Amino acid sequence: MDKRMLVIGGGIGGLAAALACARAGVAVELLERASEFTEVGAGVQLGPNVVKLLDAWGLRDALSAVAAFPERLQVRSASTGAELGMLRLGGRMVQTYGARYATVHRADLQTLLLTAVQREAGVQLHLNSEFDRFEQNDAGVRVHTTAGHELQADLLLGADGLWSRVRQRLLNDGAPVATGKLAYRAMVVQRMLPQHLRSNQVTVWLGPQLHVVQYPVRGGEWLNVVVIVHGQVQRDIASWDHRANAGAVRHSLKQSCVPLQDLVQLIGHWRLWGLSIRPPMRGPLEQAQGRVALLGDAAHPMVPFLAQGAGMAIEDAQALAQALAGAGSDVPTALQNYASVRWQRNARVQAGALRNGEIFHATGLVRWGRDTAMKMLGERLLDLPWLYNGPA
Ligand SMILES: Cc1cc2nc3c(=O)[nH]c(=O)nc-3n(C[C@H](O)[C@H](O)[C@H](O)COP(=O)(O)OP(=O)(O)OC[C@H]3O[C@@H](n4cnc5c(N)ncnc54)[C@H](O)[C@@H]3O)c2cc1C
Protein backbone atom coordinates (compact mmCIF):
# COMPACT_ATOMS: atom_id res chain seq x y z
CA MET A 1 0.00 0.00 0.00
CA ASP A 2 1.85 3.07 -1.22
CA LYS A 3 -0.76 5.76 -0.47
CA ARG A 4 -2.59 6.72 2.71
CA MET A 5 -6.05 8.31 2.53
CA LEU A 6 -8.16 9.89 5.26
CA VAL A 7 -11.89 9.70 4.61
CA ILE A 8 -14.19 12.04 6.55
CA GLY A 9 -17.72 10.62 6.90
CA GLY A 10 -19.03 7.07 7.17
CA GLY A 11 -22.26 7.44 5.20
CA ILE A 12 -22.96 5.55 2.01
CA GLY A 13 -20.41 7.65 0.07
CA GLY A 14 -17.56 7.41 2.60
CA LEU A 15 -17.96 3.66 3.06
CA ALA A 16 -18.17 3.05 -0.71
CA ALA A 17 -14.96 5.08 -1.18
CA ALA A 18 -13.18 3.24 1.65
CA LEU A 19 -14.09 -0.10 0.07
CA ALA A 20 -13.21 0.73 -3.53
CA CYS A 21 -9.96 2.52 -2.64
CA ALA A 22 -8.76 -0.15 -0.20
CA ARG A 23 -9.21 -2.69 -2.98
CA ALA A 24 -7.18 -0.42 -5.26
CA GLY A 25 -4.27 -0.69 -2.81
CA VAL A 26 -4.80 2.49 -0.75
CA ALA A 27 -4.44 2.41 3.05
CA VAL A 28 -7.63 4.03 4.40
CA GLU A 29 -8.49 5.64 7.74
CA LEU A 30 -12.13 6.70 8.01
CA LEU A 31 -13.32 9.23 10.59
CA GLU A 32 -17.01 9.35 11.50
CA ARG A 33 -18.23 11.84 14.08
CA ALA A 34 -21.20 9.71 15.23
CA SER A 35 -20.78 7.04 17.91
CA GLU A 36 -22.02 4.32 15.54
CA PHE A 37 -22.63 3.82 11.83
CA THR A 38 -26.33 4.55 11.42
CA GLU A 39 -28.63 5.55 8.59
CA VAL A 40 -32.13 6.89 8.92
CA GLY A 41 -35.16 4.71 8.23
CA ALA A 42 -35.75 5.59 4.62
CA GLY A 43 -35.27 3.96 1.25
CA VAL A 44 -33.12 4.62 -1.79
CA GLN A 45 -33.60 3.55 -5.37
CA LEU A 46 -30.51 2.29 -7.14
CA GLY A 47 -30.48 2.42 -10.93
CA PRO A 48 -28.63 -0.22 -12.98
CA ASN A 49 -25.65 2.17 -13.25
CA VAL A 50 -25.17 1.76 -9.48
CA VAL A 51 -26.20 -1.89 -9.07
CA LYS A 52 -23.62 -2.76 -11.75
CA LEU A 53 -20.87 -1.34 -9.51
CA LEU A 54 -22.13 -3.08 -6.38
CA ASP A 55 -22.23 -6.36 -8.34
CA ALA A 56 -18.66 -5.78 -9.56
CA TRP A 57 -17.54 -5.14 -5.95
CA GLY A 58 -18.79 -8.64 -5.05
CA LEU A 59 -21.91 -7.37 -3.22
CA ARG A 60 -24.50 -8.97 -5.51
CA ASP A 61 -25.60 -11.65 -3.01
CA ALA A 62 -25.59 -9.23 -0.08
CA LEU A 63 -27.77 -6.80 -2.06
CA SER A 64 -30.10 -9.58 -3.24
CA ALA A 65 -30.66 -10.58 0.40
CA VAL A 66 -31.93 -7.15 1.50
CA ALA A 67 -33.23 -5.24 -1.53
CA ALA A 68 -36.38 -5.45 -3.65
CA PHE A 69 -36.19 -5.55 -7.45
CA PRO A 70 -39.42 -3.99 -8.76
CA GLU A 71 -40.75 -5.04 -12.15
CA ARG A 72 -41.91 -1.60 -13.21
CA LEU A 73 -42.10 2.10 -12.49
CA GLN A 74 -45.57 3.52 -12.97
CA VAL A 75 -46.36 7.26 -13.11
CA ARG A 76 -49.89 8.14 -11.97
CA SER A 77 -51.87 11.30 -11.54
CA ALA A 78 -52.13 12.11 -7.83
CA SER A 79 -55.46 13.81 -8.52
CA THR A 80 -57.30 11.12 -10.51
CA GLY A 81 -55.15 8.02 -10.02
CA ALA A 82 -54.96 7.51 -13.82
CA GLU A 83 -51.79 6.02 -15.28
CA LEU A 84 -49.69 8.66 -17.06
CA GLY A 85 -46.72 6.54 -18.05
CA MET A 86 -44.81 3.34 -17.36
CA LEU A 87 -41.20 2.13 -17.50
CA ARG A 88 -40.38 -1.58 -17.39
CA LEU A 89 -37.64 -2.31 -14.85
CA GLY A 90 -36.92 -5.97 -13.90
CA GLY A 91 -35.59 -8.07 -16.78
CA ARG A 92 -35.65 -5.14 -19.21
CA MET A 93 -33.06 -3.23 -17.16
CA VAL A 94 -30.81 -6.30 -17.09
CA GLN A 95 -31.19 -6.76 -20.86
CA THR A 96 -30.68 -3.11 -21.72
CA TYR A 97 -28.17 -1.94 -19.11
CA GLY A 98 -26.61 -5.14 -17.79
CA ALA A 99 -27.84 -4.85 -14.19
CA ARG A 100 -30.97 -4.83 -12.05
CA TYR A 101 -32.96 -1.85 -10.71
CA ALA A 102 -33.02 -2.12 -6.92
CA THR A 103 -34.88 -0.42 -4.08
CA VAL A 104 -33.29 -0.76 -0.66
CA HIS A 105 -33.51 0.48 2.93
CA ARG A 106 -30.66 2.95 3.49
CA ALA A 107 -29.58 1.16 6.68
CA ASP A 108 -29.35 -2.14 4.75
CA LEU A 109 -27.20 -0.54 2.05
CA GLN A 110 -24.97 1.04 4.66
CA THR A 111 -24.65 -2.26 6.58
CA LEU A 112 -23.66 -4.24 3.50
CA LEU A 113 -21.00 -1.65 2.62
CA LEU A 114 -19.76 -1.55 6.22
CA THR A 115 -19.53 -5.36 6.40
CA ALA A 116 -17.46 -5.41 3.20
CA VAL A 117 -15.23 -2.57 4.49
CA GLN A 118 -14.62 -4.40 7.79
CA ARG A 119 -13.24 -7.36 5.83
CA GLU A 120 -10.57 -5.18 4.23
CA ALA A 121 -7.26 -5.37 6.09
CA GLY A 122 -6.23 -1.95 4.78
CA VAL A 123 -9.08 0.03 6.42
CA GLN A 124 -9.20 1.50 9.93
CA LEU A 125 -12.51 2.94 11.15
CA HIS A 126 -12.69 5.60 13.88
CA LEU A 127 -16.04 6.51 15.44
CA ASN A 128 -16.55 9.60 17.64
CA SER A 129 -13.98 11.40 15.46
CA GLU A 130 -15.10 14.77 14.22
CA PHE A 131 -13.07 16.50 11.52
CA ASP A 132 -12.20 20.10 12.29
CA ARG A 133 -9.58 21.36 9.75
CA PHE A 134 -6.67 20.41 7.52
CA GLU A 135 -3.43 21.81 6.12
CA GLN A 136 -1.86 20.53 2.93
CA ASN A 137 1.60 20.95 1.38
CA ASP A 138 3.84 19.12 -1.10
CA ALA A 139 4.54 16.33 1.37
CA GLY A 140 0.98 15.48 2.39
CA VAL A 141 -2.12 16.56 4.28
CA ARG A 142 -2.55 16.95 8.05
CA VAL A 143 -6.00 16.64 9.62
CA HIS A 144 -7.05 17.94 13.04
CA THR A 145 -10.10 16.58 14.83
CA THR A 146 -12.24 18.66 17.17
CA ALA A 147 -10.84 16.60 20.07
CA GLY A 148 -7.34 17.82 19.19
CA HIS A 149 -5.98 14.68 17.50
CA GLU A 150 -3.76 15.00 14.42
CA LEU A 151 -3.51 12.56 11.53
CA GLN A 152 -1.20 12.63 8.52
CA ALA A 153 -1.88 11.15 5.07
CA ASP A 154 -1.20 11.56 1.36
CA LEU A 155 -4.75 12.64 0.59
CA LEU A 156 -7.98 13.70 2.27
CA LEU A 157 -11.47 12.79 1.05
CA GLY A 158 -14.43 14.81 2.28
CA ALA A 159 -17.45 12.49 2.26
CA ASP A 160 -19.12 14.40 5.07
CA GLY A 161 -22.43 15.11 3.39
CA LEU A 162 -24.56 18.12 2.57
CA TRP A 163 -23.17 20.36 5.35
CA SER A 164 -19.57 19.30 4.66
CA ARG A 165 -16.93 20.99 6.79
CA VAL A 166 -14.17 19.66 4.51
CA ARG A 167 -15.85 21.57 1.67
CA GLN A 168 -16.05 24.72 3.78
CA ARG A 169 -12.33 24.51 4.54
CA LEU A 170 -11.44 23.75 0.91
CA LEU A 171 -13.81 26.01 -1.07
CA ASN A 172 -15.27 28.40 1.52
CA ASP A 173 -18.33 28.82 -0.71
CA GLY A 174 -21.06 29.29 1.88
CA ALA A 175 -23.88 27.06 3.01
CA PRO A 176 -26.34 25.06 0.88
CA VAL A 177 -29.62 26.86 0.19
CA ALA A 178 -33.14 25.74 1.02
CA THR A 179 -35.18 24.71 -2.05
CA GLY A 180 -38.54 25.54 -0.50
CA LYS A 181 -39.47 21.86 -0.81
CA LEU A 182 -40.05 19.42 2.03
CA ALA A 183 -39.79 15.63 1.98
CA TYR A 184 -41.95 13.60 4.36
CA ARG A 185 -40.75 10.01 4.56
CA ALA A 186 -42.32 6.93 6.11
CA MET A 187 -41.89 3.16 6.19
CA VAL A 188 -44.82 0.81 6.61
CA VAL A 189 -44.96 -2.98 6.93
CA GLN A 190 -46.87 -4.16 3.87
CA ARG A 191 -48.82 -6.89 5.65
CA MET A 192 -50.35 -4.19 7.89
CA LEU A 193 -51.90 -2.62 4.77
CA PRO A 194 -55.08 -3.79 3.05
CA GLN A 195 -54.34 -5.86 -0.07
CA HIS A 196 -55.19 -3.06 -2.52
CA LEU A 197 -52.57 -0.74 -1.03
CA ARG A 198 -49.69 -3.23 -1.01
CA SER A 199 -47.26 -2.75 -3.86
CA ASN A 200 -44.15 -4.27 -5.38
CA GLN A 201 -43.52 -1.60 -7.99
CA VAL A 202 -42.17 1.93 -7.95
CA THR A 203 -45.08 4.35 -8.17
CA VAL A 204 -44.61 8.07 -8.75
CA TRP A 205 -47.79 10.11 -8.18
CA LEU A 206 -47.72 13.58 -9.75
CA GLY A 207 -49.98 16.34 -8.50
CA PRO A 208 -50.00 20.11 -8.72
CA GLN A 209 -47.14 21.34 -6.51
CA LEU A 210 -46.49 17.94 -4.99
CA HIS A 211 -45.43 14.41 -5.79
CA VAL A 212 -45.35 11.11 -3.96
CA VAL A 213 -42.96 8.21 -4.52
CA GLN A 214 -43.50 4.73 -3.09
CA TYR A 215 -41.54 1.53 -3.50
CA PRO A 216 -40.87 -1.73 -1.66
CA VAL A 217 -37.73 -2.38 0.40
CA ARG A 218 -36.50 -5.33 2.51
CA GLY A 219 -37.46 -7.91 -0.11
CA GLY A 220 -40.88 -6.31 -0.43
CA GLU A 221 -41.83 -6.65 3.25
CA TRP A 222 -41.85 -2.88 3.78
CA LEU A 223 -43.17 -0.02 1.69
CA ASN A 224 -41.16 3.23 1.59
CA VAL A 225 -43.28 6.33 1.00
CA VAL A 226 -41.97 9.85 0.28
CA VAL A 227 -44.24 12.88 -0.06
CA ILE A 228 -42.65 16.02 -1.52
CA VAL A 229 -44.50 19.31 -1.02
CA HIS A 230 -43.69 23.02 -1.05
CA GLY A 231 -42.81 24.60 2.30
CA GLN A 232 -40.05 25.54 4.74
CA VAL A 233 -38.71 23.73 7.76
CA GLN A 234 -39.33 25.88 10.82
CA ARG A 235 -36.53 24.36 12.90
CA ASP A 236 -32.79 23.74 12.44
CA ILE A 237 -32.42 23.23 8.69
CA ALA A 238 -28.97 21.61 9.04
CA SER A 239 -30.50 18.76 10.99
CA TRP A 240 -31.84 16.54 8.24
CA ASP A 241 -34.40 14.66 10.09
CA HIS A 242 -37.41 15.94 12.05
CA ARG A 243 -40.33 14.13 13.58
CA ALA A 244 -43.27 15.17 11.43
CA ASN A 245 -46.92 15.60 12.03
CA ALA A 246 -49.04 12.98 10.21
CA GLY A 247 -51.88 15.52 10.04
CA ALA A 248 -49.71 17.86 7.94
CA VAL A 249 -49.08 15.11 5.38
CA ARG A 250 -52.77 14.19 5.20
CA HIS A 251 -53.67 17.85 4.80
CA SER A 252 -51.21 18.22 1.87
CA LEU A 253 -52.91 15.33 0.07
CA LYS A 254 -56.53 16.17 0.83
CA GLN A 255 -57.29 16.89 -2.86
CA SER A 256 -55.71 13.62 -4.01
CA CYS A 257 -57.30 10.43 -5.32
CA VAL A 258 -58.75 7.88 -2.90
CA PRO A 259 -55.93 5.25 -2.93
CA LEU A 260 -53.33 7.89 -2.11
CA GLN A 261 -55.46 9.34 0.71
CA ASP A 262 -56.14 5.82 2.03
CA LEU A 263 -52.40 5.12 2.12
CA VAL A 264 -51.43 8.25 4.03
CA GLN A 265 -54.37 7.82 6.43
CA LEU A 266 -52.86 4.49 7.50
CA ILE A 267 -49.37 5.85 8.18
CA GLY A 268 -48.91 7.34 11.64
CA HIS A 269 -45.18 8.12 11.72
CA TRP A 270 -43.44 10.45 9.31
CA ARG A 271 -40.01 12.07 9.30
CA LEU A 272 -39.45 15.43 7.69
CA TRP A 273 -36.47 16.68 5.63
CA GLY A 274 -36.10 20.23 4.39
CA LEU A 275 -34.41 19.82 1.00
CA SER A 276 -31.31 22.01 0.60
CA ILE A 277 -28.96 22.05 -2.36
CA ARG A 278 -26.12 23.78 -4.16
CA PRO A 279 -26.23 24.79 -7.82
CA PRO A 280 -24.90 22.21 -10.32
CA MET A 281 -21.08 21.96 -10.31
CA ARG A 282 -19.29 24.44 -12.59
CA GLY A 283 -15.89 22.82 -12.87
CA PRO A 284 -13.47 20.17 -11.58
CA LEU A 285 -12.03 22.47 -8.89
CA GLU A 286 -15.30 22.01 -6.99
CA GLN A 287 -14.50 18.30 -6.68
CA ALA A 288 -10.74 18.31 -5.93
CA GLN A 289 -7.84 20.66 -5.29
CA GLY A 290 -4.30 19.57 -4.49
CA ARG A 291 -4.46 16.62 -2.11
CA VAL A 292 -8.08 17.12 -1.06
CA ALA A 293 -11.13 15.71 -2.87
CA LEU A 294 -14.86 15.75 -2.23
CA LEU A 295 -17.35 12.96 -2.88
CA GLY A 296 -21.12 12.45 -2.72
CA ASP A 297 -23.32 15.14 -1.16
CA ALA A 298 -20.24 17.07 0.03
CA ALA A 299 -19.37 17.69 -3.64
CA HIS A 300 -22.73 17.74 -5.42
CA PRO A 301 -25.82 17.78 -3.21
CA MET A 302 -28.99 17.44 -5.26
CA VAL A 303 -32.73 17.22 -4.92
CA PRO A 304 -33.78 13.56 -4.92
CA PHE A 305 -35.97 13.77 -8.05
CA LEU A 306 -33.74 11.58 -10.20
CA ALA A 307 -33.13 9.20 -7.27
CA GLN A 308 -29.35 9.28 -7.84
CA GLY A 309 -27.68 11.11 -4.91
CA ALA A 310 -26.31 7.95 -3.31
CA GLY A 311 -25.79 6.55 -6.80
CA MET A 312 -23.48 9.40 -7.79
CA ALA A 313 -21.56 8.97 -4.50
CA ILE A 314 -20.99 5.30 -5.37
CA GLU A 315 -19.95 6.18 -8.93
CA ASP A 316 -17.54 8.79 -7.47
CA ALA A 317 -16.03 6.07 -5.26
CA GLN A 318 -15.32 3.82 -8.23
CA ALA A 319 -13.78 6.68 -10.25
CA LEU A 320 -11.58 7.73 -7.31
CA ALA A 321 -10.31 4.17 -6.83
CA GLN A 322 -9.48 3.94 -10.54
CA ALA A 323 -7.69 7.28 -10.53
CA LEU A 324 -5.61 6.33 -7.47
CA ALA A 325 -4.84 2.82 -8.71
CA GLY A 326 -3.14 4.13 -11.83
CA ALA A 327 -1.43 7.10 -10.19
CA GLY A 328 1.96 6.23 -8.76
CA SER A 329 2.92 8.77 -6.09
CA ASP A 330 1.52 11.85 -7.86
CA VAL A 331 -1.61 12.27 -5.76
CA PRO A 332 -2.64 15.78 -6.93
CA THR A 333 -2.66 14.63 -10.57
CA ALA A 334 -4.68 11.54 -9.65
CA LEU A 335 -7.26 13.74 -7.88
CA GLN A 336 -7.40 16.12 -10.83
CA ASN A 337 -8.13 13.13 -13.06
CA TYR A 338 -10.83 11.98 -10.65
CA ALA A 339 -12.44 15.44 -10.67
CA SER A 340 -12.27 15.82 -14.44
CA VAL A 341 -14.00 12.48 -15.11
CA ARG A 342 -16.72 13.10 -12.53
CA TRP A 343 -17.81 16.74 -12.38
CA GLN A 344 -19.76 16.99 -15.65
CA ARG A 345 -21.80 13.87 -15.02
CA ASN A 346 -22.50 14.99 -11.45
CA ALA A 347 -23.54 18.44 -12.72
CA ARG A 348 -25.83 16.85 -15.33
CA VAL A 349 -27.56 14.73 -12.70
CA GLN A 350 -27.91 17.74 -10.36
CA ALA A 351 -29.47 19.80 -13.18
CA GLY A 352 -31.70 16.94 -14.34
CA ALA A 353 -32.99 16.43 -10.80
CA LEU A 354 -33.83 20.14 -10.49
CA ARG A 355 -35.64 20.06 -13.84
CA ASN A 356 -37.65 17.03 -12.74
CA GLY A 357 -38.76 19.02 -9.70
CA GLU A 358 -40.31 21.63 -12.01
CA ILE A 359 -41.91 19.01 -14.26
CA PHE A 360 -43.23 16.80 -11.45
CA HIS A 361 -44.92 19.74 -9.67
CA ALA A 362 -46.19 21.52 -12.79
CA THR A 363 -49.60 23.17 -12.89
CA GLY A 364 -51.84 24.46 -15.71
CA LEU A 365 -50.67 24.20 -19.31
CA VAL A 366 -47.25 22.82 -18.46
CA ARG A 367 -48.92 20.02 -16.56
CA TRP A 368 -51.22 19.28 -19.48
CA GLY A 369 -48.20 19.22 -21.87
CA ARG A 370 -46.29 16.90 -19.53
CA ASP A 371 -49.15 14.42 -19.26
CA THR A 372 -49.75 14.47 -23.02
CA ALA A 373 -46.06 13.93 -23.79
CA MET A 374 -45.91 11.05 -21.36
CA LYS A 375 -48.94 9.38 -22.94
CA MET A 376 -47.52 9.79 -26.45
CA LEU A 377 -43.87 8.94 -25.76
CA GLY A 378 -44.38 6.54 -22.83
CA GLU A 379 -41.25 4.60 -22.01
CA ARG A 380 -39.08 6.70 -24.32
CA LEU A 381 -39.60 9.68 -22.01
CA LEU A 382 -39.04 7.80 -18.76
CA ASP A 383 -36.03 5.75 -19.79
CA LEU A 384 -32.65 7.47 -19.24
CA PRO A 385 -29.90 5.68 -21.21
CA TRP A 386 -27.31 8.42 -20.52
CA LEU A 387 -27.83 7.80 -16.81
CA TYR A 388 -28.50 4.07 -16.57
CA ASN A 389 -25.62 3.09 -18.88
CA GLY A 390 -23.25 4.53 -16.28
CA PRO A 391 -20.35 6.90 -16.88
CA ALA A 392 -18.70 6.77 -20.30
C1 LIG B 1 -35.90 12.52 0.47
C2 LIG B 1 -34.66 11.94 -0.13
C3 LIG B 1 -34.74 10.85 -0.99
C4 LIG B 1 -33.59 10.31 -1.60
N1 LIG B 1 -33.71 9.26 -2.44
C5 LIG B 1 -32.58 8.78 -3.08
C6 LIG B 1 -32.68 7.69 -4.00
O1 LIG B 1 -33.77 7.14 -4.25
N2 LIG B 1 -31.54 7.25 -4.61
C7 LIG B 1 -30.32 7.81 -4.34
O2 LIG B 1 -29.30 7.38 -4.92
N3 LIG B 1 -30.20 8.84 -3.46
C8 LIG B 1 -31.29 9.33 -2.83
N4 LIG B 1 -31.18 10.37 -1.95
C9 LIG B 1 -29.87 11.01 -1.77
C10 LIG B 1 -28.95 10.23 -0.86
O3 LIG B 1 -29.61 9.90 0.32
C11 LIG B 1 -27.70 11.06 -0.57
O4 LIG B 1 -27.21 11.62 -1.76
C12 LIG B 1 -26.59 10.17 0.02
O5 LIG B 1 -27.04 9.51 1.17
C13 LIG B 1 -25.35 11.00 0.35
O6 LIG B 1 -24.40 10.17 0.96
P1 LIG B 1 -23.07 10.81 1.54
O7 LIG B 1 -22.28 9.65 2.10
O8 LIG B 1 -22.44 11.69 0.53
O9 LIG B 1 -23.52 11.77 2.74
P2 LIG B 1 -24.25 11.44 4.12
O10 LIG B 1 -25.14 10.27 4.01
O11 LIG B 1 -24.83 12.71 4.62
O12 LIG B 1 -23.04 11.00 5.08
C14 LIG B 1 -22.14 11.94 5.64
C15 LIG B 1 -21.49 11.33 6.87
O13 LIG B 1 -20.47 12.22 7.34
C16 LIG B 1 -20.53 12.33 8.74
N5 LIG B 1 -19.94 13.65 9.08
C17 LIG B 1 -20.45 14.88 8.80
N6 LIG B 1 -19.63 15.84 9.25
C18 LIG B 1 -18.56 15.22 9.82
C19 LIG B 1 -17.36 15.67 10.45
N7 LIG B 1 -17.09 17.00 10.59
N8 LIG B 1 -16.47 14.75 10.92
C20 LIG B 1 -16.72 13.40 10.77
N9 LIG B 1 -17.86 12.92 10.19
C21 LIG B 1 -18.76 13.80 9.72
C22 LIG B 1 -22.02 12.23 9.05
O14 LIG B 1 -22.25 11.84 10.38
C23 LIG B 1 -22.47 11.15 8.03
O15 LIG B 1 -22.31 9.85 8.57
C24 LIG B 1 -32.31 10.89 -1.31
C25 LIG B 1 -32.21 11.97 -0.41
C26 LIG B 1 -33.37 12.49 0.18
C27 LIG B 1 -33.24 13.64 1.15
Image (cartoon, helix red, strand yellow):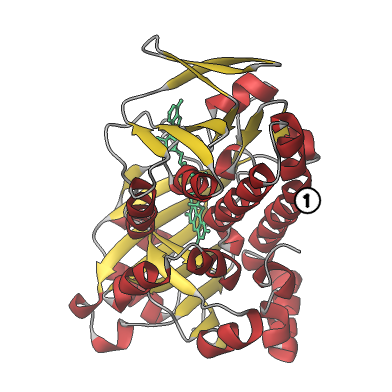
- The image shows residue 200 at horizontal and vertical percentages of 38, 83
Q: Which of the image's four quarters has the C terminus?
A: bottom right
Q: Tell me the amino acid under the disc marked 1.
A: Gln
Q: Which residue sits at x=43%, y=44%?
A: 11
Residue 383 versus residue 186 in the image, above or below: below
Determine the residue located farthest toward the top in the rendered image: 148
Kind of element beneath mark 1: helix
Q: Which residue sits at x=41%, y=39%?
A: 123
Foreground of the two, 142 or 238: 142
Q: Which residue sits at x=73%, y=34%?
A: 286
Determine the residue located farthest toward the left in the rendered image: 192
- The image shows residue 88 at horizontal and vertical percentages of 57, 87
- The image shows residue 154 at horizontal and vertical percentages of 60, 25
Residue 257 figure quarter: bottom left
Foreground of the two, 321 or 300: 321
Q: Is residue 114 left or right of residue 300?
A: left
Residue 252 versus residue 72 in the image, above or below: above
Q: Which residue sits at x=44%, y=65%?
A: 58
Read off the residue under disc 1.
344
